[in-house]
């Protein structure tokens, strides 16, 4: 089975408070075992853990995972390099995160437009 292209467009993030590891895996095109590994490597990533050690990710966790994914898969950073990049002051100015937010907003606005056109 071929791996999906890393530069593929990721789906919009639904308007929910919590996401399961399976949902995050689909939203970020990363397998669950990779997400669990990244939790150990990136201190910025810490999902809420509930009964039975089940993980629940919030929207900012999903955005962080997408940023980590972009650094590792698209920009070619190593785990250590990505960790350093995220912990540095440059991370706030990193255009990858802003691009993801803008794409998410565009997708949500397009969904609203579809609904508005149906009701008109």
Image: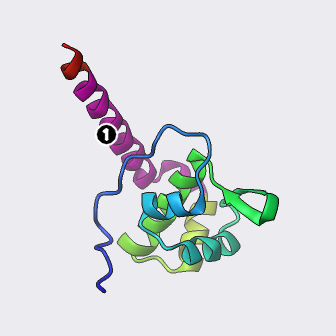
Pick out the residue farthest to the right: 51
Q: Is residue 32 left or right of residue 112?
A: right
Which portion, as a residue range, is magenta?
89-115
In depth, the one of 75 and 62 nearer the eye is 62
Give the percent coordinates (x, y) of residue 3. 33, 80
Q: Residue at x 30, y 74 (%)?
A: 4
Most prominent secondary structure in the magenta stretch?
A: helix
Give the percent coordinates (x, y) of residue 53. 78, 65
Crowd rating for badge 1 (residues with CA inside 10 Å; few <14, some 14–19, many 20+): some
Give the percent coordinates (x, y) of residue 40. 70, 74
* Number of callouts: 1
Q: Secondary structure at mark 1?
A: helix
On whether residue 105 falls in the magenta region, the answer is yes
Q: Residue at x 52, y 59 (%)?
A: 24
Q: Residue at x 35, y 35 (%)?
A: 108
Give the percent coordinates (x, y) of residue 62. 53, 54
Q: Is residue 88 visible?
A: yes
């Amino acid at each position: 089975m071929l791996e999906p292209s890393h530069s593929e467009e990721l789906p919009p993030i639904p308007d929910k408070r919590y996401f399961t590891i399976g949902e995050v895996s689909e939203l970020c095109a990363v397998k669950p075992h990779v997400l669990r590994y990244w939790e150990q490597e990136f201190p910025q990533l810490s999902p809420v853990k509930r009964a039975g050690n089940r993980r629940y990710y919030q929207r900012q966790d999903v955005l962080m995972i997408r940023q980590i994914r972009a650094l590792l898969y698209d920009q070619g950073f190593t785990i250590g390099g990505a960790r350093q990049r995220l912990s540095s002051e440059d991370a706030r100015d990193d255009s990858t995160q802003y691009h993801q937010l803008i794409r998410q907003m565009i997708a949500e606005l397009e969904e609203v437009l579809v609904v508005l056109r149906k009701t008109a």
